[in-house]
Image (spheres, coloured by chain):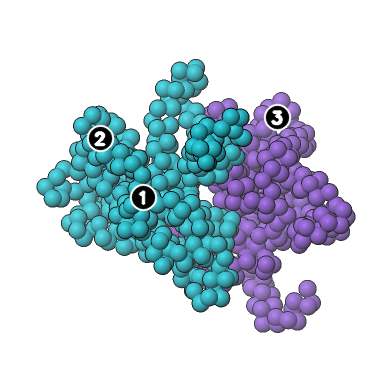
Chain colours: A cyan, B purple
């Protein structure tokens, strides 16, 4: 069992309803009233971006945390969904874009990207552990080089620009507050979906497959099918995140799914902690904060503002070195230590508590 | 060899026929009919030899990668960074000292030292945790890439070709007839021939060390069963250090070689990391002959694809990988574990 199931993260689940910590209510309230006091930059650039990246990282977290498969192809699936939105919807490249209605191209994009994710999964599950990383990395880079060279469909190096969210339900989703609520809603939905699936029979079987595939196979579970289905589910999540990300950037290009971006998603998931769905969003928020504000911080220390990658890389190394569970793991450890510091009988602080 | 041919007579025949056809394609002058299908012979033969050279370079990078993986089960995703670092160091040293014979060993030594440091200070602390090691190598590659960007900037460098290797060599291969009817022989840059020879020498040397020496025996035993080797009193950490240092140094040398016949710029590290990934996936993880075969196939496909279908050359590489994974997941020459 992973940490995710030992502590109920999701509201709306009957079993967990009694145990929702007040922190969750406070966080939910804060997120809902955020547009009242946060500026447009924070809503759109910080929170909007965090939620997009968080959803993509969540799909990786689902595969890695519950399936034990570290797939580096999630960003590629996301970018493919973004490309499909640009190709079937409207973009600045009018010669390629078909300009279909949003209720056609959105399902179509998710469907195609999910089919691609399933195909990749079918390939990747033939191998295990580190081999999966290698193969998905190779596929991701093949996609990157292919989109860069293909001009007929993917418009080559420059990709598609002016990919804006369509107006539906009479709202301009390009506005910061509207986009904030759109991404927030999708992030919460994806989060709940992962929390739900992880406790469904399928999710439990998947975790069983992660822990001991041979035993699960002996019990009559189809190990390969479970793994491929996990890739499909993660593919849906990634394509939702990818579409939002493309709308946030208003463009999609080969570098959307370049090696750097692929690694970024892994960094986000690991920094946040791959054991719990929440970790993906925590990691994404930290990543976005770092990448948005590191120029200011770096220049205040007298360093060149371009060293942001160095900061991220060193942070990632530190996390992998000292806390394999990421930031949430650190939080858990801190709580454990506090709990240890109290005497279990009297509840008072122990003198000279063991650390 | 005879055992293989006896066990798979049909496949042996197919391979022999294919090899003979290839040899005929290279050596014989082409008829006009053939030229109308495949284009001019010079283009084809040049692509073929270009592919061979590229394969040689890929082999230099991938053999260290596969050796490290085979012994330590550690996917060193910072291998591409070691390649690029070797190239940059080669450029710096090449500016100070003219001779390649100084540059190559020096770069080998420096990058090998970095490799020793990584193995001793980083990977030894998390032995057996494959996933964590892999993540750490990703982190190291991100940090190294940014450090190199900091030091050497974003422009691209090309290393000076040593004087005694400049200019083309004439190979005894007829590529066509000139107007007077005399045979025109193929001309090919000497450097590339030197690279090819170097890769072959290093490959054969590695094979000899692995199969004929005591160190090689230790390494092979370590690949097969690490625990038993440790139990029989071998200090396996020293073997690990030697292999990691050697693999890293080889990547450094490959960087110098790659910087001579292509160029060095940020991004080349991931390119060569991916090339070595694909090469060892196709050839079989942990196998030196597999790395050679994989490098040959990938190099040839990339170059020939570049000539005949420029847009889709990446896709060919990818398709080969998919086909290998689908029908032989352990790689062409990989052992099933």
Q: Residue at x 75, y 54 (%)?
A: B203
Tell me the mark number nearer the camera, choosing from 1 and 3: 1
The chain that hosts pointer 1 is A
**Residue B88 relative to residue B203: left or right:** left
The chain that hosts pointer 3 is B
Residue A160: which disc? none
* Depicted B106 relative to depicted B216: above or below: above
Label 3 SS: helix
Coordinates of residue A301 in the picture (x, y in percent): 49, 18
Q: Residue at x 43, y 37 (%)?
A: A287
Q: Quadrant of residue A319?
A: top right
Tell me the mark number nearer the camera, choosing from 1 and 2: 1
Which sits in the foreground, A146 or B136? B136
Among numbered discs 1 and 2, the one appearing first in the sequence: 1
Whether residue B236 is visible to the viewer of this picture, yes or no, is yes
Coordinates of residue A49 in the picture (x, y in percent): 33, 40
Q: Quadrant of residue A174?
A: top left
Which sits in the foreground, B243 or B106? B243
Question: How would you rate the neighbour count of disc 2 (Cα within 10 Å): few for under 14, some for 14-19, many for 20 or more?
Answer: some
Label 1 SS: loop
Whether residue B24 is visible to the viewer of this picture, yes or no, is no
Q: Are marks 1 and 3 in contact (CB under 8 Å)?
A: no
Question: Which residue does the numbered mark 3 point to in the structure image?
Answer: B93
Residue A19: which disc? 1
Label 2 SS: helix
Spatial CA span between label 3 and label 2: 57 Å
Q: Residue at x 71, y 25 (%)?
A: B96
Residue A34: which disc? 2
* Depicted A341 relative to depicted B65: above or below: above
């Amino acid at each position: 069992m992973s940490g995710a199931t030992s502590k109920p993260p999701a509201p709306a689940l009957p079993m967990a309803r009694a145990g929702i910590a007040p922190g969750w209510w406070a966080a939910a309230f804060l997120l809902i009233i955020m547009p009242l006091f946060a500026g447009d930059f924070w809503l759109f650039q910080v929170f909007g971006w965090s939620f997009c990246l968080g959803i993509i990282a969540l799909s990786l977290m689902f595969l890695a945390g519950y399936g034990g498969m570290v797939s580096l192809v999630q960003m590629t699936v996301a970018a493919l969904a973004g490309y499909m939105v640009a190709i079937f919807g409207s973009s600045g490249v009018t010669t390629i874009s078909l300009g279909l209605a949003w209720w056609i191209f959105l399902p179509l994009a998710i469907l195609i990207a999910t089919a691609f994710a399933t195909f990749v999964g079918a390939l990747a599950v033939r191998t295990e552990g580190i081999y999966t990383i290698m193969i998905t990395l190779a596929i991701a880079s093949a996609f990157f080089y292919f989109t860069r060279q293909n001009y007929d469909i993917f418009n080559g190096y420059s990709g598609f620009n002016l990919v804006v969210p369509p107006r539906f339900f009479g709202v301009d989703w390009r506005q910061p507050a509207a986009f904030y609520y759109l991404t927030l809603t999708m992030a919460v939905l994806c989060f709940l979906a992962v929390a739900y699936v992880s406790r469904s029979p399928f999710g439990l079987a998947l975790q069983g497959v992660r822990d001991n595939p041979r035993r699960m196979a002996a019990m009559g579970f189809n190990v390969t099918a479970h793994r491929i289905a996990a890739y499909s589910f993660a593919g849906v999540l990634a394509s939702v995140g990818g579409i939002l990300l493309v709308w946030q950037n208003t463009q999609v290009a080969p570098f959307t799914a370049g090696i750097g971006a692929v690694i970024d998603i892994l960094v986000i998931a690991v920094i946040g902690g791959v054991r719990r769905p929440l970790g993906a969003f925590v990691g994404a928020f930290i990543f976005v904060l770092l990448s948005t504000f590191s120029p200011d911080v770096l220049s205040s220390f007298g360093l060149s503002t371009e060293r942001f990658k160095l900061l991220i890389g060193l942070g990632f190394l530190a996390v992998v070195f000292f806390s394999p569970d990421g930031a949430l793991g650190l939080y858990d450890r801190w709580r454990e230590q506090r709990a240890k510091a109290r005497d279990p009988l009297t509840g008072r602080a122990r003198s000279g508590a063991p650390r | 060899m005879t055992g293989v041919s006896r066990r798979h007579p049909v496949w042996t025949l197919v391979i022999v026929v294919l090899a003979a056809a290839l040899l005929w394609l290279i050596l014989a002058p082409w008829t006009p009919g053939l030229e109308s299908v495949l284009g001019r012979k010079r283009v084809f033969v040049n692509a073929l030899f270009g592919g061979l050279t590229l394969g040689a370079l890929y082999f230099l990078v991938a053999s260290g990668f596969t050796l490290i993986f085979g012994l330590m089960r550690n996917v060193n995703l910072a291998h591409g960074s070691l390649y690029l670092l070797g190239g940059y160091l080669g450029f710096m040293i090449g500016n100070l000292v003219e001779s390649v014979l100084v540059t190559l060993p020096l770069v080998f030594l420096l990058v090998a030292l970095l490799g020793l440091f990584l193995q001793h200070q980083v990977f030894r602390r998390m032995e057996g945790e494959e996933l964590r090691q892999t993540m750490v190598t990703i982190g190291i590659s991100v940090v190294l890439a940014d450090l190199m960007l900091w030091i050497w900037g974003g422009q691209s460098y090309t290393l000076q070709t040593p004087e005694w290797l400049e200019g083309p060599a004439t190979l005894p291969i007829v590529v066509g007839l000139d107007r007077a009817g005399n045979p025109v022989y193929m001309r090919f840059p000497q450097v590339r021939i030197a690279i090819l020879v170097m890769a072959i020498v290093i490959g054969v040397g590695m094979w000899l060390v692995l199969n004929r020496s005591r160190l090689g025996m230790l390494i092979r035993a370590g690949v097969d069963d690490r625990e038993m080797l440790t139990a029989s009193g071998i200090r396996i950490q020293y073997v690990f250090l030697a292999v990691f240092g050697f693999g890293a140094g080889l990547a450094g040398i490959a960087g110098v070689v790659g910087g001579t016949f292509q160029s060095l710029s940020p991004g080349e590290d991931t390119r060569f990391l991916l090339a070595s990934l694909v090469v060892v996936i196709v050839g079989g993880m942990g196998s030196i002959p597999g790395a050679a075969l994989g490098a040959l196939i990938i190099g040839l496909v990339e170059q020939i694809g570049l000539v005949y279908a420029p847009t889709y050359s990446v896709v060919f590489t990818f398709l080969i990988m998919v086909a290998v994974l689908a029908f032989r997941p352990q790689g062409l020459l990989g052992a099933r574990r």
